Amino acid sequence: MTEPSSHGIAQPPNTKEPIISVTGLTKRYTGIVAVDGISFTVERGEVFGMLGPNGAGKTTTIEILEGMRRADSGTAFVGGIDVQRNPKKVKSIIGVQLQTTAFFDNLSVAETIKLYGELYGERVDVDAILNEVELTDRRKAYFKQLSGGQKQRLSIAVALVNHPQVLFLDEPTTALDPQARRHMWELIQRIRATGTTIMLTTHYMEEAEELCDRGAIMDSGKIVKMDTPKALVEQLLATGFTATREVKPATLEDVFISLTGRSLRED
């Protein structure tokens, strides 16, 4: 049985077996092959990124792994569970943060977390989870009163109530300001440090470099390359690639953070 950590976040069993294993996964829609026979594994405790342009197939892949969509062919196992045969059981061991999430407007943050704990049949340490996602001071606030970054962190808090072995994050920092984005990175790194496996999609390549142990780059339903961020860059450089723009030791975002500070600015 998976034991919760001191934060209320799962500590997966110590094993070298992949926690996600995908073989020949295919999904077709009318006239479109959204996922075209892809295969990959995700190791326990790593952060794995699904990267690619819009329409590449990454969201469909994630939805199949979450048990939200059926594949046409191929196999997908999460935590040793066949997703196709037992999607309900898979949902019991994963947490899902969606890019756009709607909660009850007139429930407080603490009440929302408690409600989801009851839905999962879990005894939830609400204060520990609020502290983990930096929402302690908003425990009595209603969902409709939260900023964009706070809503994203509440979504992650809810995804943690069942002590998931795998946490799926869909564009977790979209539309966040630089401070909120970096705080989200720190939250993801803290969750990963407990041993929880994280699979995320992002369009921000610097985010993938910062967070991911490995990444799969998808295009037209296929995985075109998969490796560590460092190895992917080195493979490109080995082809003779030369950057068309100057690589600077600091970015405008670094200037922004330096001038305005790292603390969250939320209403």
Image: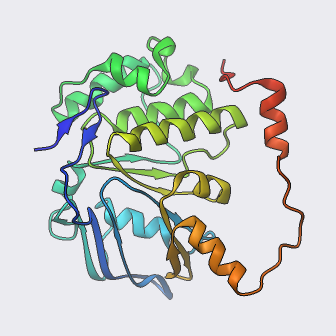
Residue 127 percent coordinates (x, y):
35, 16
Foreground residue, 250 or 127?
Answer: 250
Note whether 261 is above or below 204 in the view shown. Answer: above
Whether residue 107 is visible: no
Q: Give the image quarter of residue 28.
A: bottom left
Foreground residue, 240 or 73?
Answer: 240
Question: Which image quarter is the N terminus in?
Answer: top left
What colour-coding does the image apply? rainbow
Residue at position x 32%, y 27% in the image: 7
Note whether 244 is above or below 201 in the view shown. Answer: below
Q: For this view, does 67 lie left or right of residue 216? A: left
Q: For this view, does 226 lie left or right of residue 234? A: left
Residue 263 percent coordinates (x, y):
67, 22
Q: For this view, does 258 lie left or right of residue 51? A: right
Q: Give the image quarter of residue 218.
A: bottom right
Residue at position x 32%, y 63% in the image: 43
Whether residue 222 is visible: yes
Residue at position x 42%, y 17% in the image: 108
Q: For this view, does 181 lie left or right of residue 8? A: right
Residue at position x 69%, y 26% in the image: 262
Foreground residue, 162 or 116?
Answer: 162
Q: Give the tally of numbered discs.
A: 0
Residue 222 percent coordinates (x, y):
49, 83
Question: Which image quarter is the C terminus in?
Answer: top right
